[in-house]
Amino acid sequence: EHGGAMKSFIDEVLDDTAVQFVRSEQRQVSTEHIAMKSNVTVVTGNTFQSLVMEREEEHTMLLMKQSTCGHCKRFSIFWNEFQTIIQALNWSSVINVCKIDVSKNDVPHPQIDALDLPSVYYFPAGSKETPIEMTPKYDKDSIDAQYQYDEGLSWVTSGYDVVEWMMKQGKLDLELLISLDANKANSIEEDKQYNKHN
């Protein structure tokens, strides 16, 4: 038969069975070790599907960064604080905080554009196909609009800004989050009582 590998490739593309190449960093360390550093889940090109897209019931916040980017290093401080807040409020079962180094990994999603770094995308539970980009805050009618836009995510000055932005998207079940925080508070109180009597 004529065409060989090229014909097979064209047939796979036309049949929609071709496998997309995804650039992916190979992780040599265990996820337990990664979690101990900052408790932010490290995503690679190969794990994007399982850690972000397949977790339909979880809200996922994904930081796209580059290891040599100064703005990304500054933003990582707020990102780690954001993860600490999520843990302190007992929301980790509902909100997954992730990061990916886009200099070493592709993000295989058609609506993701990581040209400006750092970039943050929110993948709401139940609608992972339509992520929401955390965009710069700027007044489009201002004479400084281009400057304000170019400042990117510099309006984020703490992890609380990320929590507030996420809540304003209107996708979170706030009653569930309040109950999770209340459950943790009750659990802490029970532990205190137990420790007093033993």
Image (cartoon, grey):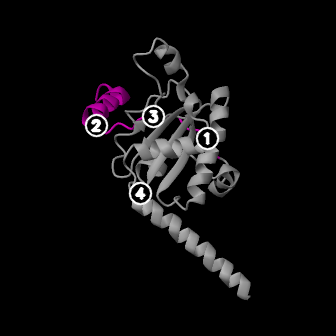
Judge depth for marks 4 and 2 and give the one in front: 4
Binning the other alpha carbons within 10 Å of mark 4 as few (below 14), some (14 to 19) or many (20 upward) gives few
Mark 3 → mark 1, Cα distance in angstroms: 36 Å
Binning the other alpha carbons within 10 Å of mark 3 as few (below 14), some (14 to 19) or many (20 upward) gives few
Name the residue rendered at 37%, 33% in the picture: 110
Judge depth for marks 4 and 3 and give the one in front: 4
Q: Which residue is mark 1?
A: 158
Mark 4 → mark 2, Cα distance in angstroms: 40 Å
- Residue type pointed to by label 1: Ser
- Residue type pointed to by label 2: Asp
Mark 2 → mark 1, Cα distance in angstroms: 44 Å
Mark 4 → mark 1, Cα distance in angstroms: 21 Å
| Nearest to N terminus: mark 4 or mark 1 | 1
- For residue 122, side relative to residue 150 (left or right): left
Judge depth for marks 2 and 1 and give the one in front: 1
Q: SS at mark 1?
A: loop
> Where is the C terminus found, in terms of image quarters?
bottom right
Can see residue 48?
A: no
- Residue type pointed to by label 3: Phe
Q: Which residues are magenta?
A: 1-27
| Nearest to N terminus: mark 4 or mark 3 | 3
Q: Which residue is mark 2?
A: 16
- Residue type pointed to by label 4: Leu
Q: Locate residue 88, reporting x and y percent.
A: 60, 59
Where 186 falls versus 29 (above or below)?
below
Q: Residue furthest top?
A: 143
Camera-side residue of 99 and 191: 191
Camera-side residue of 148 and 78: 148
